[in-house]
Every structure is written in structure tokens, then in C-alpha cells.
Image (spheres, helix red, strand yellow):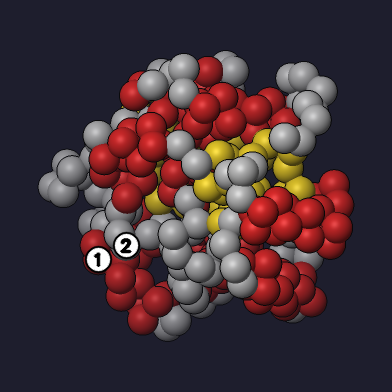
Amino acid sequence: MAKIIAILNFKGGCAKTTTAINLAAALQILNKKVLVVDLDFQCNATSNLGFRPNMGNTIYELLTQKGIEDMPIYEFKKGYDYIPSSKEMKNINNILVNKNNREYILRKILHLVQPLYDYIIIDCPPNGGLLNKNAMAAAESLLIPVECEAYSIQGVGTILDEVKEVKDDEVNADLEILGFLLTRYDSNLSIHKAIASELRSKFQDKVFNARIRKNTALSKASAAHQTIYDYDKNSSGADDYMQLARELTGTKPKSKAR
């Protein structure tokens, strides 16, 4: 039965999509069967995984039940599947708001395929409204990427408030924080060290030992519509996401934080 993890931060540019596609790739290398669900109308994960417009149905048709008969699951590679997004998702909140049990539409969908996978990873949009509420209702836990920049930790408070609301309203009383992931980390910069120290002080073992270091190969892999393991499996980015995957799966003890 798959563990459902939503990768969420209301701030753009903190490596949500980079984390979704590359964590999934690392898990697949560790022989886990993975499904990535792209909820973002920008479709970055979708395009990185090779889907193009008019190739078939997407998460939009699935959520709205418009002209769809089969689950729109596509194979990226053996053991790594995805449900693509669509530009039409830009207006999805206006459609979902009029539906009954609107917070639970995604959960009902994913429960149908949950027995087929080890991990289901949801790439959430920034400021997604009902989409993010659906993701939090469907997920067991949240993985929160935190960019190593000023004010990034302040934004975490907004996420925690939203999680509390989801739990208090019993939309998903069992939702937990899986962990905070530092991204674009540079150990040579004092501000990055300070942010890492503050995050660890506030959230202790909820901060992953894995840190995603600044690495041009990650940006180049995205531009090439590839995972980091297809683009440069020997890069620091590949190493970092593999450490994260190993922390999640427990395939080896957590290494000391860098």
C-alpha cells in the first residue's frame, strides 16, 4: 500500500517540482514503484516527464470527470509512473468549489491506485487553494522544501497553520509533517548555515539530514526535461536526492548532516 506524500510550500521557486521528480527517480532506483501526481497548472513536472499536450487525458479530466473512462496514468520508465497536469488546471478551483465533498476528490482517486505503488508523490502548486486542500486530505504526510533564503522560515508558519486547520476541521486528522528539506544549500554561506541551524532548533528531527545543495546540473536536467539521474547520475544533486530517498525508506542509517 503506497505511502502518499504531498510536496508542499506556498512559496514558489523552492524546488517542489525538482524534488518531486528526482525523489521519485531515486526511489525507483531503490526498487520502489512510484507514482508522481502533478497538480500544478504550470505543468513543469509533466513536461519534465515527457508528456505533451494532446497526448491524452490529465489530472484535470480526472478531477472534473470530463470525458474520461480510464485512469490517466503514464509510464515514464519501469516502476515510475505519473499523472500529468494541464494548463486548464489554472481555473480548477472555480470548478471544485461547487462539488460535493470537494476536499476529498483527489483522495478518492488515489485510493483506487494506492495498492499498486510503494510511494505516491503529489507535486502541489503554490497558493493552490482547494488543490492544496485536496492534496493534504489525500496525503499521509507533507514534505516541505525550504529554500535557504531570508524569510523562508517565516513562511513555514503559514504552512503549519494550514496543517493545523486541516487537522482541526478533520479534513485529515492524521496528516503529519514528514520533514523539512533544505534546498539550494551552500555550506560556504553563513546565511544558509544560520537558516539550517534555526530550522533544526525549531523542528529538530523533523528536518531531513539530506540537504539539496546548489548544483547547476539540477537546473540543466530540468531544462533538458530529464531527471538528475538521466542527466548526470554522478552529480551532487543525484547524491543528495538519493540520501533523501534512503532516509525515507530506511535503507541505511541517517548520515550526519553536512
Q: Which mark is residue 41?
A: 2
Q: Nearer the viewer, residue 221 or 132?
A: 221
130 vs 210, nearest the viewer: 210
Question: 45 and 106: which one is in front?
Answer: 45
Residue displayed at 44% across by 44% down = 18
Relative to 13, does residue 100 appear above or below in the rendering? Answer: below
Above or below, 233 relative to 48: above
Q: Position of residue 87 (x, y in %)?
A: 24, 62
CA separation, marks 2 and 1? Answer: 7 Å
Q: Are marks 2 and 1 in contact (CB under 8 Å)?
A: yes
Find residue 65 and report its horizontal and vertical position in percent.
33, 61
Marking on residue 57:
none
Label 1: which residue?
88
**Mark 2 element type:** loop
The quadrant where residue 107 appears: bottom right
Side (left or right) of 148 relative to 76:
right
- Residue at x 30%, y 53% (from the top left corner): 43
Measured as percent of width and height from the top left, residue 38 is found at: 40, 51
* Amino acid on which the number 2 mark rests in the picture: Phe
Left or right, 185 with reference to 43? right
Element on which disc 1 rests: helix
Q: Is residue 6 above or below residue 217?
A: below
Image quarter of residue 95 = bottom left
User: Mark 1 belongs to which amino acid?
Assistant: Glu
